[in-house]
Amino acid sequence: MQLYEESTEADSKYPLLDIKEQLPFFCCINLVLNPSDQKDISKYIYCKEVGIPPHQGEYSTQPSLWVEKFWTIKQALNIREYLSAEQAKQKAKQNGSF
């Protein structure tokens, strides 16, 4: 979360993408992945697919840490989808089917 906060303070348009691109220069990507974060991502996807809140109550009663994680995970998955779409476009262009 600290890297994300620093990146947003720098007025980056896509802070998570910036972090992803710079991370290999500082450490092994496998050291960044931890089971707790993977569990949060799983919870996010499950709650989104099933349509239930992760904790009891409405939006105003959700823990603030979870709300921050929710928006961070959502943005990361949106960037992932965008990059996948761009790669597919490039591949289609190279194959001449675009």
Image (cartoon, rainbow, N blue to C red):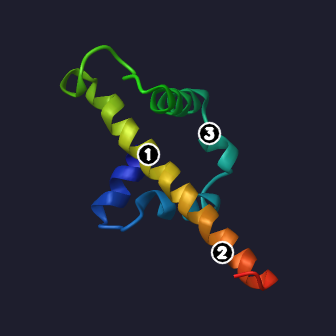
Q: Position of residue 60 (x, y in %)?
A: 18, 26
Question: What amino acid type is highlighted by mark number 3?
Answer: Leu
Residue under label 1: 74
**Image location (x, y in percent) of residue 87:** 67, 70
Q: Quadrant of the N terminus?
A: top left
**Secondary structure found at label 2:** helix
As drawn, 96 above or below 76: below
The span from disc 1 to disc 2 (Cα, nearest Å) is 23 Å
Identify the residue shown where x is 42% and y is 64%: 14
Sequence-wise, the earlier of marks 3 and 2 is 3
Q: What residue is at 28 percent from the left and 24 percent from the top? A: 63
Q: Marks 2 and 1: in contact by CB < 8 Å?
A: no
Q: CA distance from mark 1 to mark 3?
A: 17 Å
**Residue furthest out toward the front:** 97
Disc 3 target residue: 33
What's the residue at 60%, 33% (across, down)? 34
Q: Seen in the image, is 15 located left or right of residue 27?
A: left
Instruction: Please state the horizontal and vertical placement of residue 88, each as a whole percent of the image.
Output: 69, 69
Residue of label 2: 89
The mark that comes first in sequence, 1 or 2, is 1
User: Which label sits on residue 40?
Assistant: none
